[in-house]
Image (spheres, rainbow, N blue to C red):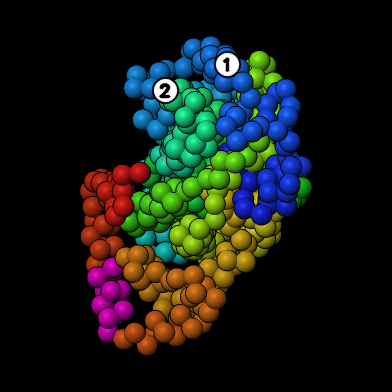
Amino acid sequence: MSDLPFGFSMPNDPDDESGRGSGGSGPGAGSGGPGGGTPGPGDFPFGDPQQMAQMLRQFADMMAAAPAPGSAGPGDTGSGINWDMAKNIARHTVSQQGDASIGPLQYAQVSEALRLADLWLNEATPLPSGVQTTEAWSRAEWVERTMSTWTRLCDPLTSRIVTSMGQNMPEEMQSVAGPLMGMMQQMGGMLVGQQAGQAIGELAGEVIGSTDVGLPLAGEGRAALLPHGVEKFGEGLQIPEEEVRLYLAAREAALHRLYAHVPWLRSHVLGLVEEYAAGMSFDMSGLEERLGGIDVSDPAALQEALSGGEGLFQPEDTPQQKASLSRLETSLALVEGWVSVVVDEAVRDRLPQAGALAEATRRRRATGGPAEHTFATLVGLELRPRRLREAAALWSALTEARGGEGRDALWEHPDLMPSGSDLDDPEGFVSGAGSGGDQLDLDISRFTEGLEDGGKDDEKGGGEKGDGPESGPRDGA
């Protein structure tokens, strides 16, 4: 997969042509500045300091319209990234792709499919409905409705990138730039924001609903499909569009059902992203090479160099980050596997082409759908289809051994959830759970009582239960 964190390349990436550590084959190798020549021991590594100052002044002019640090606007989260700007770039990207508005007929078709599919799910899981509203979106509306969650998901990562631009600069540059380092970080924040907006805008052209990345991006209870995304998914399948829509609606409604009634899940996933971001560190030697080989009097060339197209920042692979990514992968695989099992059970006898639609979904995962590409872009994570299949096998085995209530009781607390090693041995986990005796039975009893209480609250029109994930553990991303 070529998509990496906003212009990053992973360590030892064979596609990384920066030439770092290769004896001078990368950009700018063998030249201490635009004029060429190898710098001496006391020389400034980026060429003439006056040219460096000129470069920064030109970038300051380019950013004149951007808010200054400390002047928090509605899109400023304090991380150095202006997310309002990122949203505007995403919307511009969508408009370039072509984006027709949603008509009344399409809206009605989507709403009807979501309501009907949600009713079918009642027979496949004891979890009550999590759908509060049903909507049909254009691509631009998807960007608008989901941007707040993208901000929360991406901000820990992008803020680390921007901070590292100043903290990890070579000592020679810090000593010369001095007070200009704040401007360098602002430049980095602007460029990272541009790339974030571009990535989200391109993703809008692929998504089907509000839950493609394993999170309800528009908030719990707000189920939505993109008619254009549904149509694109069904291309070449030779399956009636109504059947495709109902199957995808069932997947959308199932994930909302899970997040609405598993209060810790949303904050758990976001917390794993934060945990990974907290350990991010970068080798900045690539920046020295790149700036040393460009014409600093050309702002366009400078922006291209800092845009990270060939891996400007290289995240260092640490055991802590590997462990964080493994836990995140396992959590998302368990979510995806549960959705697959529950949806297959709900639609098996209702949709003639249910098997073909399930296979098309698996194939989409295997070739890299929106979820895989997005997380690979943000955190270097690729959701492996093998893990998704194993997660589905585990949930299927639990369903056969303990029924829907016994299966879904594991969502009551994160400590009850299968681990990555359990995905390698689903039968072993099921048999181990089966010998757990009274404790697991007690957990199931408490879980069932909670479902009954939640169902009564839903009948009264409370609906507060769906807000639980916002106050779960490790919240506050």
Magenta highlight on residue 444: yes
Q: What number of labels is visible?
A: 2
**For mark 2, what is the residue?**
179
Disc 2 crowd, CA 10 A, few/some/many (<14, 14-19, 20+): few
- In the image shown, does 241 or 181 lie closer to the viewer? 181
Residue 222 screen position, x and y as percent: 41, 41
Give the amino acid at mark 1.
Answer: Gln
Tell me if residue 197 comes above or below residue 435 in the rendering: above
Q: Secondary structure under badge 2?
A: helix
Q: Residue furthest front?
A: 41
**For mark 1, what is the residue?**
50
- In the image shown, does 208 or 415 lie closer to the viewer? 415
Residue at 57 percent of width and 70 percent of height: 390
Residue at 31 percent of width and 86 percent of height: 437
Give the amino acid at mark 2.
Answer: Pro
Residue at 57 percent of width and 66 percent of height: 387
- The magenta span reads 438-447
Residue 98 screen position, x and y as percent: 67, 25
Residue 138 screen position, x and y as percent: 56, 30
Q: Is residue 300 left or right of residue 123?
A: right
Question: Quick one: quadrant of the C terminus?
Answer: top left
Label 2, label 1: how far apart the Cα atoms are: 15 Å
Residue at 35 percent of width and 65 percent of height: 414
- In the image shown, does 28 or 62 lie closer to the viewer? 28
Tell me if residue 323 comes above or below residue 175 in the rendering: below
